[in-house]
Amino acid sequence: MSSEPTMRIITQDTVGGPEVLYLTEAPRPAPLPTEVLVRVRSAGVNPVDWKTRQGGGMAGVLGDPPFSVGWDVSGVVEEVGFGVHTLKVGDEVYGMPWFPRQAGAYGEYVTAPSRHFARKPAALDHDHAAAVPLAALTAWQCLVDAAHVEAGGRVLIHAAAGGVGHFAVQFAKHLGAHVIGTARAAKHDWLHSLGADELVDYTQERFEEAVRDVDVVIDLVGDEHDATSTRSLRTLRPGGTLIAVPSGASPDLMEAARARGVRASGFLVEPDGAALARIGGLVDEGAVSVEVEDVLPLAEAAEAHRRGEEGRTRGKLVLRVAS
């Protein structure tokens, strides 16, 4: 019998519905130079996870199954490789390792370059910290790096109550913007408490008829859902910017944007430990809150995907990997 250490991990042998996910044993990874081994306490669940499971999302990067989805982790450094100077054994960390390559976050251990992680915000337990990295980095990089949001700008955020959206509302407000969001009416009071200045119930009115003169649109819905990106072009003032996150900026969308004198751009998030450290500071200062709708055990990853795909989650769903 092999004495190689193993771990529990969720994997899949084929693409398909949530039922293709199953819990199994796999060899425990070991850190290379500049990497750390993190014992995962909790793992965040994101739309890219179930899209990849279905054969979309990052499946083209991962290749044919078997593979393991998941990129959000919060845990404890258990081992450090040669050359690591920023973290040490015992540090509580959170991160989005390796995205878009396989990280295997739905498992008991991950290894990745140390600078894919940052120290976990002291104000958060591991469940809430695991809800942060991919969603918060997406929101931060969209607003700061891609759209260059400035104080006084007007920002429209679609799906403002979702995982990325509720961070985008808070970050845009932190940057000094006037924040407009789309969400169902039941979530308006909560979003106002996060800093939203105006809200549109997309089930009751067409947002492009209610919103005008926006500098930046962060579209977290995409053109595949009722042409949200294309319709958003009408809300932008000349010279404005649309960041289309889930479906990207198609040639047709970019041409339509040019015809209106605005810019449309796709987006893909990158690992960024330095930005996570800054975000963690905002959390510890009380400037940013993290919404977790529910925490499920690792073995119920399929159920987490089923619930997430319904599209009604407030904030994030999280898998508890270890207590």
Image (cartoon, helix red, strand yellow):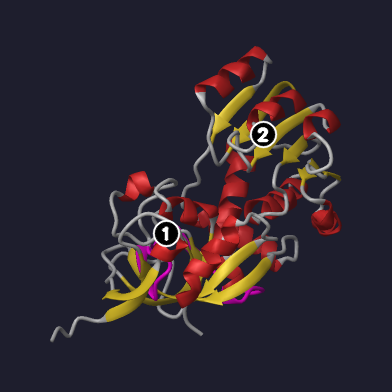
Relative to 20, say whether 217 is above or below.
above
Range of residues picked out in magenta: 104-126
Looking at the picture, tell me which residue is in the foreground, 173 or 316: 316
Looking at the picture, tell me which residue is in the foreground, 18 or 245: 18
Q: Is residue 37 left or right of residue 170?
A: left
Q: Residue at x 57, y 40 (%)?
A: 245
Q: Residue at x 35, y 44 (%)?
A: 60
Q: Is residue 170 left or right of residue 198?
A: left
Q: Residue at x 43, y 52 (%)?
A: 54
Relative to 130, say whether 248 is above or below.
above
Relative to 173, say whether 286 is above or below.
below
Write down the quadrant of residue 207 in the picture: top right
The N terminus sits in image quarter: bottom left
Q: Which residue is mark 2?
A: 228
Residue 35's spot in the image, x, y percent? 33, 64
Q: Is residue 321 left or right of residue 265?
A: left
The nearer-to-camera label among 2 and 1 is 2
Looking at the picture, tell me which residue is in the foreground, 76 or 41: 41
**Does 112 lie within the magenta span?**
yes
Q: Secondary structure at mark 2?
A: helix
Task: Tell me if I can see residue 121 in this picture.
Answer: no
Name which residue type carries label 2: Thr
Q: Is residue 224 left or right of residue 13?
A: right
Write down the quadrant of residue 223 in the picture: top right
Q: Which residue is mark 1?
A: 97
Q: Residue at x 40, y 55 (%)?
A: 16
